[in-house]
Each structure stands twice: as structure tokens, then as C-alpha cells.
Image (cartoon, rainbow, N blue to C red):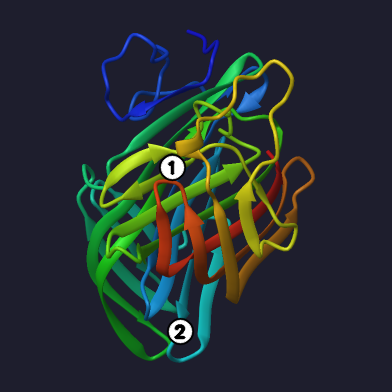
Amino acid sequence: MSVTAPYRGPLGAPTPERPLVALPPDPLPMVRDRRLRKGWRYVGVFTPELSLCLALAQVGPFRQSFWAVWDRAAGQLHDRTKRHAGGVRMTPGRAQLQSADATIDLRFDEDDGSPIETITPYGGAYAWTIKRGAVAIRGSVHVGGREHLIDGLAVIDDSGGYPPRHTVWNWAAGIGEDVAGRTIAWNLATGIHDDAFASEQTVWIDGVPRHVGPVRFAVDLSAVDDALGQRDGERPVPDDERGVALRFTREAVREHHENLLLMRQSYEQPFGTVSGRLPGGVELRTGFGVMEHHDVVW
């Protein structure tokens, strides 16, 4: 089984272009092309009252978990990162945390959010991702002596495979409403799954996904814009996939840095508000989301 070209399509679409490779829940070898298998689920909830994330990841036999709650009204960020499950549990349609610091219980429909699947070749191996936007999510959060009832929208990221041993990416995701009153979700990235024509980059407009052309991130994660120009020999990106001009105002930052010799990672992930424009005639009236810069050797 091999991947010879990037692929993008609706999850489960029976198209002849989709590579016939193993993907979860099917078993994947621990090592391929001298790289350890990776996999993670990230659930991000973005509302006017709070932003939160809950994630469980695995690199080969090693696990890591993290969670964060940005309580906008209280002006408090609560977060933890652990080199084990740390009380985080992911099951179909449910994301939970049970720890001494916080309790989180979120429920959602796995088929919600118009899932988009992307598969990208990397040398003799491949990586994959499934992004869901504007997923209806309900539940509760207990942290910092406060209780929050969740009835909002989420972005869910399922990813894995065998990306390059040294991977550097930028990522932006969030939820908002445009001036026409439509529900908007977005997922933008550089450094991974960022082929100009078959990338993970997506904007959902009232639940309908559309592809987004190449973007560039400000070094300080304050903005995301259309990338300039095309490389020689590439066909131009369609006009309806262009039009990204987002501005990000950070409110709270979670970050983590560690060096385990064979594995190293450094990331910065601020929560904040988002304004600006997305393809499809989207002018945001409100926007809440997350930005990320991640540099990892795995």
C-alpha cells in the first residue's frame, strides 16, 4: 500500500482517487519508513464565554494528554500537560477529563461537522487527518471552582500516520458568525497537509465545507493571509478558494517545551478572538478560536 499523491474528500467517500491505505480503526504498523506511528484526537470548543481544548495523543508506545480552559469572563486560564493519559478519555461521540484539577464531559455526534479527510504522502510513508467543523457539542466543565454548561460548537481534529520525523506546522481553527448571520468554522494550516489543491484547509459555511487555497501565518501568530503567488509550473488556485485575511487577538496562551533526546517538542497555542475575511464571501461578525505553532521531532 502506498500514497503517490495528496488526496482530499468527504470522509468515507468511495472514490477511485482515495488511496487504499490502512487508517484507524484498522491497525497500523508501529513503524513505517523508519518513523514511529502517530495519532491524536483534539476537541476544541470556542464560545463567547470560554474556549477549551481536550486532547489525547500517542507517538509509538508513548502517550501524552493535555487540556486547557480559557474562562473569558473570569480572565483565568487553566491547563495541564501530562506524559500519560492524565485522566483524559476519548470514546466515539464523547470526550472526558477526570482529574484533581478539573472535570470535563462533552458529547457530540461523530457524523456531525461534515468531516473532510486528507491523506498526504511523505517519502515512503503517509499521514492522514480528518477535520470536522461546527460540530454541535454539549456537556459540562468544572474547573477553578466554577461550573460551565456547554451548548455550542466545536472543531475536532483526528490525525495520525507517519509524518516526517522533524515536522513544523502552523495551525488556526475556530468558530464564528459572519455578517450575513451564517455559522462559520475554519481550519487552516501550513507545514503539514498543505498541498495547494488537496489540503486539509477548509472553511465550513452553515455546515457546508469548501477548500481553501495556500495561506501564510504571521510569525507572531497575529494574522493569516493568502500566500503570495504560485511556484513555477503550478496551476493557479481558483479565485473562490482565495480571500483569507484574518486577524487574531490573543487573550491567553498555553505552551509546552520538552526535550526527551529522541523526541523533542515546542509549541505555543494561544486562544483569542478573530476578525476578518474568509473565502466564500465570509466577513466575520464574531470569531473565537485558537492559533498554534508547533515544532516537533518525533
Q: Quadrant of residue 218?
A: bottom right
Compared across the picture, whether 281 is left or right of 234 comes to left
Label 2 crowd (10 A; few <14 / some 14-19 / many >=20): some
Residue 172, image x and y in percent?
54, 54
Compared across the picture, whether 98 is left or right of 32 comes to left
Q: Is residue 87 visible?
A: no
Q: How far apart are labels 1 and 2 at the CA level?
A: 27 Å
Q: Nearer the viewer, residue 90 or 232?
A: 232
Image height check: is 288 above or below 85? below
At a point 42% along the width and 89% down the height, the residue shown is 73
Q: Helix, strand, or loop for circle 1? A: strand
Residue 45, image x and y in percent?
37, 64
Label at residue 202: 1
At a point 66% along the width and 42% down the height, the residue shown is 227
What residue sits right under mark 2 in the picture?
72
Label 1 crowd (10 A; few <14 / some 14-19 / many >=20): many
Amino acid residing under circle 1: Thr
Image height check: is 193 above or below 99? above
Amino acid residing under circle 2: Arg
Q: Nearer the viewer, residue 196 or 132?
A: 196
Q: Quadrant of the C terminus?
A: top right
At a point 31% along the width and 55% down the height, the residue shown is 134
Query: Is label 1 or label 2 in front?
Result: 1
Image height check: is 49 above or below 119? below
Q: Is residue 125 visible?
A: yes
Residue 152, image x and y in percent?
27, 67
Label at residue 159: none
Q: Which comes sooner in the sequence, label 1 or label 2? A: 2
